[in-house]
Every structure is written in structure tokens, then in C-alpha cells.
Amino acid sequence: MSSALERGLRILELMVEHPAGLPVSRIAALLGMPVSGVHRQLRELARLGYVRQPRDQGDYLLSVKLSALGLGFLGRAGVTDIAQPILDRLAAASGELIRLSVVDGEQLVWVAVAQGATTGLRYDPGREQGVVVHLASTAGGQAWLSGMSDADALELVSRQGLRPTEFEPGPGAPATRPTLLAALAEARAKGYALTVNSYMIGMAAMAVPVRHGKDGPIVGCLSIAGPTVRLDTPRVTELAPKLHEAAAELSAAADASQFFGRLREDGATASRPAQQAAGTR
């Protein structure tokens, strides 16, 4: 008789082959396991964050957690994925820290990083791959929220919390809903989100959404982060076109990427185009 661990791993291995998700009955049939047992395993895997069920009674699909673990391993092993060369070029051009986050249901998760600063002051957070992004206090989070209506953005933020509980944000972090909505309006107007002394004191960051294709749903966000003494207004203005260019490259690459392709349907439901947001804020 196989162990619970073996049954759980078999389910994960099967779901890797079906990125669009599978119903419980289909998983049970393909693996020759009782439906009740598969359901128990999926609920445990969901509790641990490895799978999720976007709709009640709907299909189960892998969360981004397993992908993030794999990407972290590949990065530490020196193996690059489709996005890493783009991140590396932007890091070299900006001389700052570049981070890529991806949309996972109602969350944004950091999955890849490139460091451009080699000397002097540098912001290097270390192990952030796989970490869920706090939406209200980060540039990446605000970039994603700015692509939604204000109502949808506030709903996501209310579920996660306007103020983070895992760390103490800086004085620049939005403390009220009106302050956050003002930041999102500014991000829409400028074409990028900008935070200063928000996620961390002494750090500034700018970010833009990454879409699946030119006009597709948002599947992630790309950000540049560095010390506030370097990322001042003139520098931010100078880097904005480079950031948009890199995000456009990632959007184009997403069409050929199975990793980003799996997130396309999630992005279509979790994100709202900026033009739709304009009519509801």
C-alpha cells in the first residue's frame, strides 16, 4: 500500500502534465485511486499551498508555489529560464535590483531576481523567491492593482490587509484606502507604480505589469528597486522606458512560455484592463 506522501506526490506529478487543472474524479480515474482519498489529499495539498481550487466544486490546479520552488532551485543551480536573460539585461542597464512576480489566483508571488549593483549601496533582500508580495506597500503590488478597478483592488487588499503583518513597512506605505487609491491613480497616469520608503525604509521601487501578449491579461509584474539616494525622480524618469521595454519583452515571451501560459486564464479573471479601471475609479 502506498504512503500518503507517495499518493500526494503522484497527484502533483499528474497535475504538472495538466496545467489547466483537473477535477477530482478525473485525477482519481487516471491514478486508479478512490475519489474520497484523492479529495483528502487535495485538501491537504491546498492547505499547504501546493494546489488550489479557484471555484467551489471546480477543478484543482497547481499553485505557483511548486513552480517558485523549482525556479529557485534552477536559479541557484545556474540554470536560466525564459525570463532570466531579460531580467539580467535590465539589471545591467539599470544597475539596480530587478524582480519578477507572477499572479497566482488572488496573490502576487516573487519568482525571479537579477542584481545589477556590484559596488556601493545596494538593496539585496536575499531569499524572496516564492514569497507572497504585500500588495499595498510594494511597487509590484500597486502595479498589479492599478490594472484593476478600484473596487476590485480594494477587495484584494482588504483580504490581505492594508498593513502587512509579517514586517514593519516604512512611512511611505499607504495607511488608508484613499491614500492607496491615490497611489493607484498616479500609477495609471504615469504608466508605472512608484513607492518610496514604503516596503522598506531607504528603498524605492518602480514597477509595471507584465501581460500575456501585448493586450492580454496581467500575468505578473516587473520591478526595479534600489536605494532612495539613487532612485530619485530624474533617475526614475530615465529608467521608465527601459522598464517598459523589458516588460514588453516578457509579454512577448509569455506567448511562447508554458509557465506564463498557465497563468493566462487566472489573469483574465483576477485582473481588469486599465481602461476598464478608468471608468470605475
Image (cartoon, grey):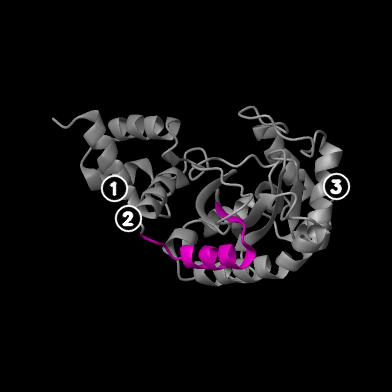
Q: Residue at x 83, y 53 (%)?
A: 185
Residue 220 appears in the picture as rendered: yes
- Residue 255 screen position, x and y as percent: 50, 70
Q: Earlier in the sequence, mark 1 or mark 3?
A: 1
Amino acid type at image mark 1: Glu
Amino acid type at image mark 2: Glu
Q: Residues within 10 Å of mark 1 (few under 14, many from 20)?
A: few
- Residue 99 screen position, x and y as percent: 57, 54
Q: Secondary structure at mark 3?
A: helix
Q: Earlier in the sequence, mark 2 or mark 3?
A: 2
- Residue 155 screen position, x and y as percent: 71, 39
- Residue 236 screen position, x and y as percent: 76, 60
Q: Which residue is mark 2?
A: 17
Q: Residue at x 40, y 45 (%)?
A: 69
Q: Which residue is mark 1?
A: 13
Q: Secondary structure at mark 1?
A: helix
Query: CA separation, marks 2 and 3?
Result: 43 Å
Q: Which residue is mark 3?
A: 182
Q: Is residue 278 above or below residue 37?
A: below
Query: CA separation, marks 1 and 3?
Result: 44 Å
Q: Which range is magenta?
A: 79-101
Given residues 92 and 103, the one toward you in this image is 92
> Would residue 93 be counted in the magenta stretch?
yes
Q: Quadrant of the N terminus?
A: top left
Q: Residues within 10 Å of mark 2 (few under 14, many from 20)?
A: few
Query: CA separation, marks 1 and 2?
Result: 7 Å
Q: Are marks 1 and 2 in contact (CB under 8 Å)?
A: yes
Checking the image for residue 119, the label placed there is none
Q: Are marks 2 and 3 in contact (CB under 8 Å)?
A: no
In front: mark 2 or mark 3?
Answer: 3
Q: Residue at x 56, y 43 (%)?
A: 125
